Image (tube, rainbow, N blue to C red):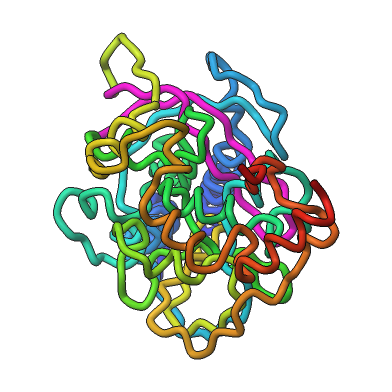
Amino acid sequence: MNFNKNPFAGLTAVLAITALQVGGALAATPAKMVEVRGEIIDTWCYLSGVMGGPDAVVGTAHHTCALWCAAGGIPVGVRAEDGTVYMVLKIKGEEPLAQTDTIMDIQSNTILAKGAHYVRDGVNYLVVEKVVSNEGITNKNHEDYGPVPGFAVPEKE
Amino acid sequence: MATNNAICCLAAACFLIAGVTFAGAEDFSKGSNAKELGLSGETKATFSGKVVDILCELSGNCPAKCGDGKRNMGIVRAADNKLIVVAKNSQFEFNGPVDDLLPYCNQTVDVDGLLLAEDPGFTAKVFMAQFIRLSGQKEWKMADLWTKAWQQRNPGAEGEGPWYRRDPRVKKQIEKSGYFGLGHEADEQWREENE
């Protein structure tokens, strides 16, 4: 490129490259097929700390609350073994807020999920195409924390 | 001239980088009337942006009406083009935000609420929408439509107690595998030891 012919050529080039980069960011985000092993969690209680620390708002202790939140339309996530939290945008090809039992059946379960992974603005998203395996509920932390919140298990009538 | 152009390029690049950095660090708490709740990494935030179906925004797979209540929704913030996950409405009974966002699908809104989260495994913030309005309107609306929408979706779930004790899908799971998800014997054992 000969900048001497056009004094604004350099600036034009920078702006053009930047426009392409911004345009790329505006277009659909590329996905990568991944397998993620982790626990199905309620993202609100986990990320907000509203019910306590992260170890208390997973597993059996938080199972009933996770059912409430999933039925309530709060985003469900997968907490992978390395601690990464993925927002689940589909499960077994089904929309996450569909009024079915699909997402309810696997709350607090540890699964191996295969699907499309998107990353945008610091958030990991997962479109689960297949639950490759399901170990059920493996984190029996109610022995340490009891039910979280405490009223999740009602007193026996 | 070549030197001048190089300086011009460098200055433009610096300006653009500084602009992006500044937008990333923008303080959205100014003008917010959100109620503070003391949640992890919480800051009050009010901003404008386009209401979107998150999966549509990411993948280009876009059903009508932002998924018509079946998909997670977010807001592409106008100030910095960031996709913000809206995880919660203003209600305090395990209620999500989609019923409050859906009427504004693909429209530009102002929202007021809380940005929060402080977790090494999740490096962004999610949003609790407390108030919402179509951009340009004066009056704010409380983001509290979930429970009424639930009643319409579940006409047979009437009775006493909060919705989450009456929800058919929740009841089905608890009847099947108990409050801890391990079966009714585990519930009974815990009760015997703790009540």
Image vertical order of residue A119 relative to residue A73, above or below: below
Q: In the rendered image, is residue B129 in sight? A: yes
Q: Is residue B118 left or right of residue B193?
A: left
Q: How many numbered marks are there? A: 0
Image vertical order of residue B153 relative to residue B173, above or below: above
Where is residue B106 shown, x and y percent of the image? Answer: 23, 42
Q: Is residue B155 left or right of residue A129?
A: left
Q: Main secondary structure of the magenta part?
A: strand
Q: Is residue A60 left or right of residue B129?
A: right
Where is residue A152 shown, x and y percent of the image? Answer: 63, 46
Residue at the spot 31% in from the left edge and 10% down from the top edge: B139
B124 vs B34, nearest the viewer: B34
Q: Which residues are drawn in magenta?
A: B106-134
Q: Is residue A111 left or right of residue A24?
A: right
Q: Which image quarter: residue A96? A: bottom left
A114 vs B182, nearest the viewer: B182
**Residue farthest toward the front in the current orientation of the protein:** A157
Where is residue B30 shown, x and y percent of the image? Answer: 57, 17
